[in-house]
Amino acid sequence: MLLYFRRSSNKMCLNLKLTLIPILMKKLCNHLFTFALLTITTSCYKNDFLDKNQKYTIEQFMNTTQIFGSDFSADEKSILITSKASGVLNAYSINIETGEQTQLTHSSDNAIIAQSYFPLDDRIIYTSDQGGNELTHLYIKNIEGNSIDLTPDSAKASYYGWNQSKTAIYWASNKRDRRYFDMYRTKVIGASIKEGEFQTKKLYTNNNGFTPSTISDNERYIALSERLTTSDANIHLLDTQTGDLHLITPHDGEAINEPQFFSKDNNNLYFTTDVDSEFTYLMSYEITTQKQKVEQKAGWDINYAYVSHNGAYLVTGINNDASTKIIIQNTQTKEFITIPDLPEGDISSVNISDNETQMTFYLSNSKIPRDLFLYHFKTKTLKKLTNTLNPEINPDDLVAGQVIRFPSFDSLSIPAILYKPNHTQKGDKLPALLYIHGGPGGQTRLNYTDRIQYWVNQGYVVLAVNNRGSSGYGKTFYKADNLKHGDVDLKDCIASKKFLINTGYVDSDKIGIMGGSYGGYLVMAALTFAPDEFAVGINYFGVTNWLRTLRSIPTWWEASRNALYSELGNPETDSLALYNKSPLFFAHQITKPFIVFQGANDPRVLQIESDEIVAAARKNNIPVEYIIFPDEGHGFSKKINNIKASYMTLEFLNKYLKGI
């Protein structure tokens, strides 16, 4: 639930965090308090619903293991993943034959994100920041166990992968100019493993805010992204031999163009675009002739396109009504690959081994957490490598999300995902909770969310609203909230109440609203600008002062600054409008209880925003609860903190919404 500005799965994520050093005793007390909370069960809350359904604690739900990422080892017998099995994200390996997992890093504080094995041995590359500040560095973990920082400066670095010959890695950093990211290649095979002795070459110097996206196998061409607005982006092609920079996506009006990959002969760039279309589709651009060709279309956005190491397979991901489906094609025979016995669900993180015989991917749905699967192209067999759901939880006690649509105030159809407790029937009077995603251009999807399952398991109806401005429903829908935030999107949320009431099992007086980041903003906007609509609010690090937020975006967001301003407003020229949509300045209108969760190290929604809205609302003599996590940024990475926040949310809801 992050504050970000994006189209589909693309890259404009406002995922930025400040580092503050937590006070040791405060941190210790925080953890002791959380431990005490975990000893309390929710069995004391008795009503008809609780008697009918198996109840689980938040600790049990959080013991479902979060995993992501995948990379094949040199012998293609192991998979490298990132897992939160230890309570903090660390690197793990999975034995393909046995499924046995081995922890490779042992951080107890900073999240470690596994990126890749080395191509000839079991060294790994990972990224990590400090205290959630998002100033990520690249590290090599040697076989001996020690780690080397490849980017030992105060800048932010991003991993871009290996070159085709697997002798060097590509990465980007803003170390030269904090506003923009340059692209580098570092030779790590055959080089000394001592820190500082790697051979690094700068491939692209970014003086114009064009962000490097992908590079051809021969390193001659680099595709650069230029973000004009959140709905308008260009692609420039840089010829590193001649220095020529060429705009390859001239167009009228607004259109999103995103580079995907270069062909293996280095002659074509494949990219997604929505020129003259509601949804993005796949195009190719022939570099020598400058001819463009439509390669693939679907009735929904094509989120991404991926080609295997030697070009044998093309994979495209389609955002089909909040669930990604993939199409796999053999590029030589043109045959489409069908995976047998594939469960229904959202597929992500497709990765094909270098010898192109095996493929990994994650699959999840609203009742199944992300699990890693392995498909073998020759034997046509599918194998499940992980079982991340806590074995203490019976899957039959979980609830499947149902895609629904309801008309908003202006008759626009709004998609949402409905979760209702098991055994619910008409005539029940259940409390309900709107769940608002971040963004504003995010999308709540049909995949597993432990907190949603927890609240539904405790007897709350949850409606995850994809209000106008959400990704995945066409560019008209995506742009429908531009410069109207806190107005039309809030009205969508209010309109959803009618749908909930018409179900016949929701108590009209017990509907709350919760959200994180931009969703947290809509929570506070609802309590401020529509104070009679919702009974309570739950705000996870939400924006409350747009003037401050847009003036304090991190330096490295310079390339996207104008795009953000075009959608949300310029704090210098649109200050009155931004003032009028900022809940902080109208906090005297809040009349309903709310709770706020805030990371002290959050760089995009600064702690002072939550401090101020809490202080202002408390003057109204209404119940306001405020929890600060000194070791978190924007989005909480530690399991113990997520447990505490979810438990306190339930306590708050039981008291002020359910009334027990």
Image (spheres, grey):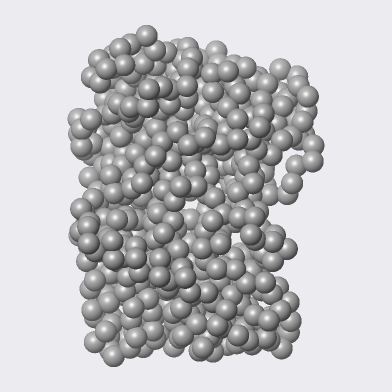
Taking the image as shown, residue 36 lies to the left or right of residue 430, namely left
Q: Is residue 170 above or below residue 433?
A: above
Q: Is residue 71 visible?
A: yes
- Count of marks, rendered view: 0
The location of residue 572, given as percent across then percent down, is 20, 60
Residue 532: image quadrant is: bottom left
Q: Is residue 520 above or below residue 120?
A: below
Taking the image as shown, residue 563 lies to the left or right of residue 466, namely left
The location of residue 659, given as percent across then percent down, is 50, 89
- Depth check: give the residue in front, 529 or 431: 431
Q: Is residue 320 visible?
A: no
- Depth check: give the residue in front, 164 or 103: 103
Identity of the residue drawn at 61% across and 23% down:
77
Identity of the residue drawn at 43% across and 45% down:
89
Residue 37: image quadrant is: bottom left
Taking the image as shown, residue 576 lies to the left or right of residue 400, namely left
Q: Is residue 284 above or below residue 580?
A: above
Q: Is residue 165 above or below residue 633?
A: above
Taking the image as shown, residue 590 lies to the left or right of residue 406, namely left
The location of residue 491, given as percent across then percent down, is 48, 75
Identity of the residue drawn at 58% across and 27% down:
78
The location of residue 263, given as percent across then percent down, is 55, 19
In which quadrant will I find the N terminus?
A: bottom left
In the rendered image, the residue lying farthest to the top is 190
Identity of the residue drawn at 41% across and 36% down:
105
